[in-house]
Amino acid sequence: MTKTETDSALLESAAQPLLNLAASPDLQDLKLLCDKAGSEITLVTNLAEALGLPASIPVFIDRQSGRPISLKSLLDEWRTSPERKSGSATVNVLESFINLTKRHATSHSVIFADTNWKSPSLTAIIDYHQNESGGPADNCKHRIKYPFPLTEEWSAWVANNGKVLNQTQFAEFIEDHRADLASPHDDEVTYWQELLGGKMAYPNELQMLSRGLKIHAETKASSAVTLATGEGEIAWEETHTARDTKGGKIVVPSLFMISVAPFYQGEKARVPVRLRYRLPQGGGAVAWFYQLYRPDIYITEQVIRDLDRAASETDLPAFQGSPEMSS
């Protein structure tokens, strides 16, 4: 017997006493009949006016179990559009960030700026919490993000910043990026030498240094420092016939300048760089590394300028930091 036939038989059996007044009714069957007839969809009213809930919630009341059953999953199956705006759009230029933010912004939208100099970004949160005191929270799930496009040149200098390189690696790096080397202005020479100490090098000196290092890539070295100028001097014990014009000695400056645009299609930043080398005790292979002086300054200044521009053109409040909710 099918379920439909079983239900029909059950209903007929339960209703039979009502049709035959001489028979005693089966109360249990009557209760089952009433329970089946009583299952329904009803509305649960939000009497407490709890924040974040609608005024009423539709539920299915199963009279047999006495339990309410949520209809949300059933209703969501029939949605022709999302319940709310959500997701993150990523743009490649500041103008697109501003225009797209203006397109979706509400009176509660905000902009956050991440000033981390290695991965700076602007993020507009469209559905941010209401700004009235005690106002309801929102989902913070609809966002527009602008990750600042760092140039390959800047990223290359940052990637090797403070990294120990052998002679060949350092020489090749300087040769590959010699277009980024900048001639220091007279005022820069005076300022940076007084602030950081040592001798400022010109691009041709760095290129000569890198070529000399290639010659001495397999030789033993010893080191000396000229205190009056801050220059370092490396002398090599030759193991082959290749020698430079100074008998195997190379003067090593302690500072140089680079001119690199941190951001794609952005202005170039002039950054002083400290040059360092290390020799093992007793001589041997030279280890090289450089240190960009405060590269975060150039990134942070640009991010703040663009944050101010975005806030002004979208008429939205702006903050440095990150929101309390992740995307």
Image (cartoon, rainbow, N blue to C red):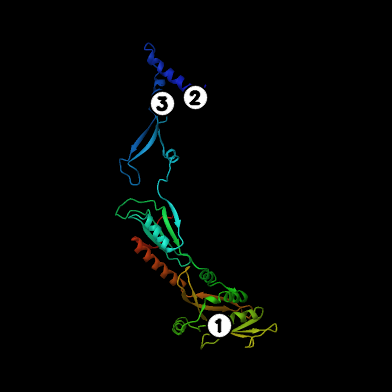
**Type of the residue with mark 2:** Lys
In the rendered picture of this protein, how many numbered marks are placed on residues?
3
**Type of the residue with mark 1:** Asn
Q: Is residue 14 above or below residue 64?
A: above
CA–CA distance in space, label 3 to label 1: 93 Å
Query: Where residue 159 sits in the image (x, y, percent)?
Result: 54, 69
Callout 2: helix, strand or loop?
helix
In the image, is 117 to the left or to the right of 315?
right
User: In this rendering, which labeled residue sits more in front, label 3 or label 1?
Assistant: 1
Q: Is residue 212 above or below residue 318?
A: below
In the image, is 175 to the left or to the right of 297?
right
Q: Quadrant of residue 109?
A: bottom left
Q: Farthest right residue?
A: 240
Which of the two discs, 2 and 1, labels the residue nearer the N terminus? 2
Q: Between residue 167 and residue 227, name the one nearer to us.
A: 167
**Label drawn at residue 300:** none
Residue at left 49%, top 24%? Answer: 3
Check disc 3 and report the residue beneath it: 36
In the image, is 15 to the left or to the right of 231?
left
Check disc 2 and report the residue beneath it: 3
**Type of the residue with mark 3:** Lys
Look at the numbered discs 2 and 3 and tell me whether their residues touch, using CB distance below 8 Å.
no
How many C-alpha atoms fall within 10 Å of the one at disc 3: few (<14), some, or many (≥20)?
Answer: some
Residue at left 39%, top 25%? Answer: 37
Callout 1: helix, strand or loop?
helix
